[in-house]
Image: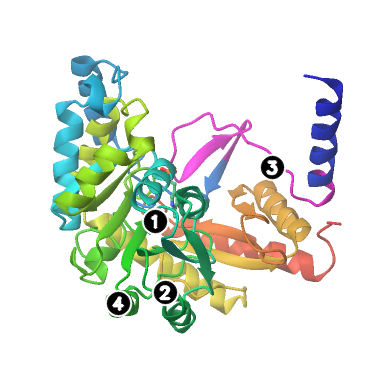
Amino acid sequence: MVASFERALAAGLQQRAEQQLYRRRLTVTSAPGAEVDVDGRRCINFCSNDYLGHASHPKLAEAATLAAKRFGVGSGASHLVCGHSSEHHALEEELAALTGRPRALLFSTGYMANLGAISALLTKGDFVFEDKLNHASLIDGGLLSGARFQRFLHNDVAALERRLARSDDEGRKLVAVDGVFSMDGDIAPLTELTELCARHDACLMVDDAHGLGVLGERGGGCAEHFELNTAQLPILMGGLGKGLGSSGAFIAGSEALIETLVQFARSYIYTTAMPPMVAAASRASIALLASEAWRRQHLNSMIERFRHGAEQLGLPLMASSTPIQPLLIGDAGRAMAYSGALMERGIWVGAIRPPTVAAGSARLRITLSASHSTEQVDRLLSVLADVSLLDRRGGLSYD
Ligand SMILES: *Cc1c(COP(=O)(O)O)cnc(C)c1O
């Protein structure tokens, strides 16, 4: 690299560090689960999105192993060339059934699903309306599409209505939101949004990365939770790497929607299909939603236990009923100090800082899982009590 380029990179990195925003990776040397080995020590994990504990479930590993023996590892090509296997196809049919949609289309990641779908459906002259707290992939998809991009205040249906009313009738209108907001854990007001979209001839898209497997009686996600059919919620994106403990994502909707994506979504067309063994693991995970429904019940009781305990301790809980239970800290350095102090006591909770969240709203993003025991949640609460007491006494050092 030329020296001037290298110097500019170094300056950018130094600034990042001075702002307490430098990111570092910790290396995990065990399977994902309630307890993991990280950087040489065992700790209780409260930062994974593996909400049901499926990621290390033997049924998923077994399905993947069997599929690897039959199909090999790599898919060999994109779906449209020769990479679309019977495992992918069966998974798409099962995802359509799970979400109550006519069809579903697999993407290799959720990021690619959002990017590909929005940019295939909209173009210059169209409109895209997005919640301020939407996931980066929805934002990036909207920007890539070239449509006129408008963000509205978080979960503020009236603010969205004003924007919809102001946009002229020419061009398509897409409203895109997270179903469960990834850093706050709250749920979008989807019933109100479907009614608003119907009144303004706008199409609703929901990213259910954090709801699938978790919300709904059968784990069908936010569409099941709010009982929204395809006409009400035409574009449903779901993730397979979080609650389902596998990897990949999909868009579910009408025949015309799916065929449009097959023809025009560039992140679907120009990429290698996910390994068939990964699709097989996702299928095993879907089967577990029915055969081990106790996982959702246990998860919900862990969420209740945590919220009850945190309330009694006076911790800064946010308004969330999902497995994402952030504690608002504010200052980025202070959030890092909390996270470090928790880690020293054997509890792993990530500090989420800007630009992932707004300046001044750094937080501990605690996530609960069906793999946690009551003892582990109680341990989290008692360590949080110790560390916040330490902080109040000025014993937690940060800049
Ligand atoms: C994680 C996430 C994605 C991206 O999914 P990947 O499969 O990890 O690329 C998209 N949307 C939301 C809301 C997410 O939390």
Mark 4 → mark 3, Cα distance in angstroms: 38 Å
Mark 2 → mark 3, Cα distance in angstroms: 43 Å
Binning the other alpha carbons within 10 Å of mark 1 as few (below 14), some (14 to 19) or many (20 upward) gives many
Residue at the extreme front: 170
Query: Mark 1 — residue?
Result: 210
The foreground one among 264 and 386 is 264
Q: Is residue 108 among the parts visible in the rendering?
A: no
Question: Considering only order in the chain, which callout, 3 or 4, is on the residue closer to the N terminus?
Answer: 3
Residues at circles 2 and 3 in contact by the CB criterion of under 8 Å: no
Query: Mark 4 — residue?
Result: 191
Question: Please, what is the three-letter code of the amino acid marked with disc 1?
Answer: His
Count how many numbered circles sit on residues in the image: 4
Magenta stretch: helix, strand or loop mostly: loop
Mark 1 → mark 3, Cα distance in angstroms: 23 Å
Q: Which quarter of the image is occupied by the N terminus?
A: top right
Residue 23's disc number: 3
| Horizontal and vertical percent position of residue 25 | 64, 36
Badge nearest the viewer, 4 or 3: 4
Q: Which residues are magenta?
A: 17-42
Question: Considering only order in the chain, which callout, 1 or 4, is on the residue closer to the N terminus?
Answer: 4
**Mark 2, secondary structure of its residue:** loop
Q: Is residue 92 left or right of residue 197?
A: left
| Horizontal and vertical percent position of residue 362 | 67, 62
